[in-house]
Image (tube, rainbow, N blue to C red):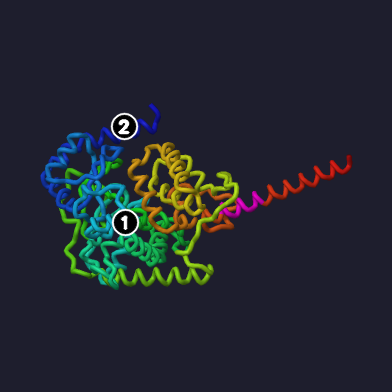
Amino acid sequence: MPEQEKEKSIKENRIRQITHLYYSNPDVQKAIFNFSQNREVVPRYFEGFGKRPDSLQYSGDVLAMVKKGATSFHCSEELWQDPLKLSTDLNEKQLNELRTGWDLLIDIDSKYIDYSKISAELIINLLKFHGVKNVGVKFSGSKGLHLIIPQKSFPKEINGVQTKNMFPEWPRIITSYITEKIKPQLIKKITELSKPNKYVRDFQAPKEVMPDIILVSPRHLFRMPYSLHEKTSLASVVLEVKDIPNFQMTDADPLKIKIKNFIPDVKEGEASELLMQALDWDKETYKEESISSGKKFSDFKPIKIEKLSEQNFPPCIRKIALGMSDGRKRGLFVLINFFRSLGIERDEIEKRIELWNAKNEVALKSGYVKSQIEWSFKNKIILPPNCKEYYNGLGVCLPDSFCSTIKNPINYTIRKSFIANKSSASEKRNTTKKTKKFKNSD
């Protein structure tokens, strides 16, 4: 048995030894069921997810699914009138009619739990500065933390626009705003932790712990409080904010947990200032980009490249295209936006994504892939993430000499293609001249 398969088998055996005992606990069942209300809930069967849509009707459904092989439970940030009415065929208007609201879920993940704890504390301090005094905190089950700001914290509408209808746009803006505001302090704090010389800034490490905006996408799921984690066999336990500094992964031993509410008691509208500040920041940020670039971000048009060749794709895109074991959903996000920005037709994008997904160590569910492509084509084209923001965290940043001259994978392909096409045209002209010269000499 290959080493990788052997390790996977060990992890599966380890978690299956405790699932029945752990989920038999009525308090665990109740905690998962209570949090599931008005949410889409999907069990995971070690590697693959169950059918969608799904929900819990009774607390006993948790153990019933475990008896069928479920190892963990995942749910939506979005809240629905009836989750079972969800479908990939619904358009934006129909989804808005079905959606009753959304919680802001900030996913902090890193290679080291200490980095995640630093990031969580900085985010919570920033939220307090903006008047958000009540934040839910839980352990992700591996090396990260999840923060939640309930829908009640946000205003019901701003300037006549209903907040419930602005998913995922507004949550993404808030998450981007938070990321930008904590970045200087995060660099400083992680540098102090990871390097003896505090004057040498560790700029790379913070990129690996920044909040995950990909979680803020339609029908994206996150691990429910008190669900087990397949890789660690630890529970996604809820923490008090004051306990974050001293939290250790061993505190998430599933046989020693204490049940707490992940959703905190909040004052209605206490996150109003946060939302308004984030929207103003977003408006000013893209206004500055418009001035410097000479065009609006929202006016971006796809680039049609003559004789588009994968040889002119940047190394990071070519690496993703080989298939992935971790970060598949982020990889999908990158590829969809990359292909759309190049003006590739939808049918061709779907074919390319299908081929890519087949190469992944574990393929993404076809329904999930379809929903992400569907959502993308319902919205304006956006560029894939800039080079410095994303690809190191995915483990696909393999820069060549050309990468230092560009800021975005699209720039790489445009310039490479221009050089290649120019060279080809020049070679064609030279060939034509030689042919004419040869004929004239006859």
Residue that label 2 marks: 9
> Which amino acid is tagged 2?
Ser
420 part of magenta stretch: yes
Q: Quadrant of residue 12?
A: top left
Q: Quadrant of the C terminus?
A: top right
Residue that label 1 marks: 92
Which residue occupies the extreme top position in the image? 1
Question: What is the magenta range?
Answer: 412-421
Which residue occupies the extreme right position in the image? 441
Q: Residue at x 36, y 64 (%)?
A: 173
Q: Secondary structure at mark 2?
A: helix
Q: Where is residue 86 shown, x and y percent of the image? A: 25, 49
Q: Quadrant of residue 191?
A: bottom left
Q: Residue at x 52, y 53 (%)?
A: 409
Q: Residue at x 39, y 45 (%)?
A: 328
Q: Where is residue 38 shown, x and y percent of the image? A: 18, 53
How many labels, in total? 2
Callout 1: few (<14), some (14-19), or many (20+) C-alpha neighbours within 10 Å?
Answer: few
Residue 293, compared with residue 88, is above or below; it is: below
Residue 350, compared with residue 275, is above or below; it is: above
Horizontal side of 402 relative to 181 (left or right) equals right
Q: Say whether disc 2 or disc 1 marks the residue closer to the N-terminus.
A: 2
Q: Where is residue 326 shown, x and y percent of the image? A: 39, 43
Q: Quadrant of residue 275?
A: bottom left
